[in-house]
Amino acid sequence: MTRAVIQGAAVATVDARGTEYAEGHVVVDGGRITAVGAGAAPVGPGDRVVDGRGCLATPGLVNTHHHLYQWATRGYAQQSDLFHWLVELYPVWAGLDEDTTRAAATAGLLRLARTGCTTAADHHYVFPAAGGDLLGATVDAAGAVGIRLHAARGSMDRGVSSGGLPPDSLVETTDGALAATQAAIERWHDPAPDAFTRVAVAPCSPFSVSAELMSGAAELARAAGVRLHTHLAETVGEEVQCLAEYGCTPVEYAERTGWIGPDVWLAHGVHLSDRAIEVLAAGGTGVAHCPTSNARLGAGTARVADLLAAGVAVGLGADGAASNEDGGLGPELRQAAYQARLRDGADALDVRQALWLGTMGGALCLGRQDELGSLEPGKLADVALWRLDGLAHAGIADPVAALVLGSLPPLRLLLAGGRTVVEDDVATRVDEHGAARALAAAGTRLAVAAGLLGPSGGSALRHIR
Ligand SMILES: [Zn+2]
């Protein structure tokens, strides 16, 4: 792998001191960062020199929550809250197979990469009996696009007949889900520091998973030395149901089932009491904040400023594209800043805190703070180089403000492990137009299978108003 030298860029390292350079360099070699500093770096024969003038270098963004398969089911249930949205989408997701999942995951990962993301956690919890190897299809897609994947092997064992939300046809048995999760760890989890593929244990949510599966999953993950992920405290409806069924709040339920600890990160954490925030902070448990999805579903506004003040690691998540049709991670920087300010005032979250959420905060959630999340010698060479000299950003003196508060800038370059994933705002490893065509075909197949579209593809989707 060629040594690469980025010269003349503004650099926001996101290190513990918040070091920044108005004009500096980033050098990567052999998949790692070897130098970061002010001014120009020495260049040797054979080096790839990247002109970074007019650009800002940041760590590659870390996405802490997603459902890549949902990229093929965007635009549904446009006015629905979470529970109604899920009930409308379950029958469509029932048609997932390897081809549709691969097409959706490829497109979703391409969108993430094009918005600065170099590490993505994907929470896949829908496994139709005849669907085939859906996790394998997602792992393949990440390998093709070239960014890191944390495949959170999801599960549901609580269908309608057991008081759960999903149809019985979409749930696994408790033992079957645990066995499949164990198999996924054995097949794909790479504990090496420079891993491109890791696996986490990720039952879906309290309203689709039994307490036995929650507890069993926690035991399995700790025996295997992998991390734990689930949805928690996303909506008021979830809290009402949790209180009615278990006599406790979602965070108390997490405590009871072994789901508070430094190896756990939870998606959403919107509806949290002061005590719940204390529990998460004391347990070292992270939160994947998904502001656009929370807005799309009217779920509420997370207490991000309070979580950060308490010392909770908060990362950003695009969440599934069925509740965030944009699907990009870069735009969540601004969404996070805006929502924190709508909730707590204009000084609630500054632009550097927003960038921290998307980088170091995410690395902490995934347990990779020693490898990812900042530009420092020895860390993995995951670098985003944002172009700030165009019409949309020129003249904004603070480059981090331009990135967070302006429209998302084009990418001059995106490196993952030192390898080019995006160059001059085009993905370099997968043809974007071919991926878009495959995605459209996958979306049509799912709609036809769900009876929402005629075989000719001609009739309008019934549910779109
Ligand atoms: Zn989610």
Image: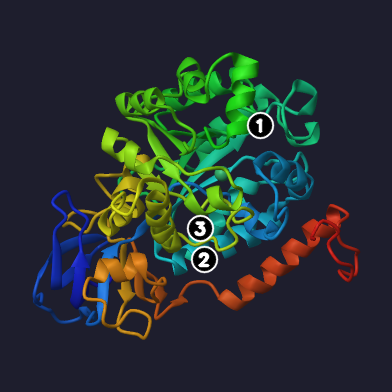
Ligand 1, image quadrant it occupies:
top right
Front position among marks 3 and 1? 1
Contact between labelled residues 3 and 2, with CB atoms less than 8 Å apart: no
* Image height of 312 relative to 378, above or below: above
Q: How many marks?
A: 3
Q: Residue at x 26, y 77 (%)?
A: 396
| Residue topped by disc 2 | 111
Residue type pointed to by label 3: Ala
Contact between labelled residues 1 and 2, with CB atoms less than 8 Å apart: no
Q: Residue at x 46, y 50 (%)?
A: 317
Q: Give the side of residue 291 with respect to residue 359, left or right.
A: right
* Image height of 432 relative to 285, above or below: below
Residue type pointed to by label 1: Met
| Foreground pick, 102 / 60 | 60
* Image height of 362 relative to 389, above or below: above
| Residue topped by disc 1 | 156
| Residue topped by disc 3 | 142
| Foreground pick, 70 / 239 | 239
Q: How is the image coloured?
A: rainbow
Report x, y in % for residue 49: 22, 81
Report x, y in % for residue 105: 59, 58
Report x, y in % for residue 423: 39, 77
Q: Quadrant of the N terminus?
A: bottom left
Q: Quadrant of residue 280?
A: top left
Around disc 2, counting alpha carbons within 10 Å, would you say few (fewer than 14), some (14 to 19), or many (20 or more)? Answer: many
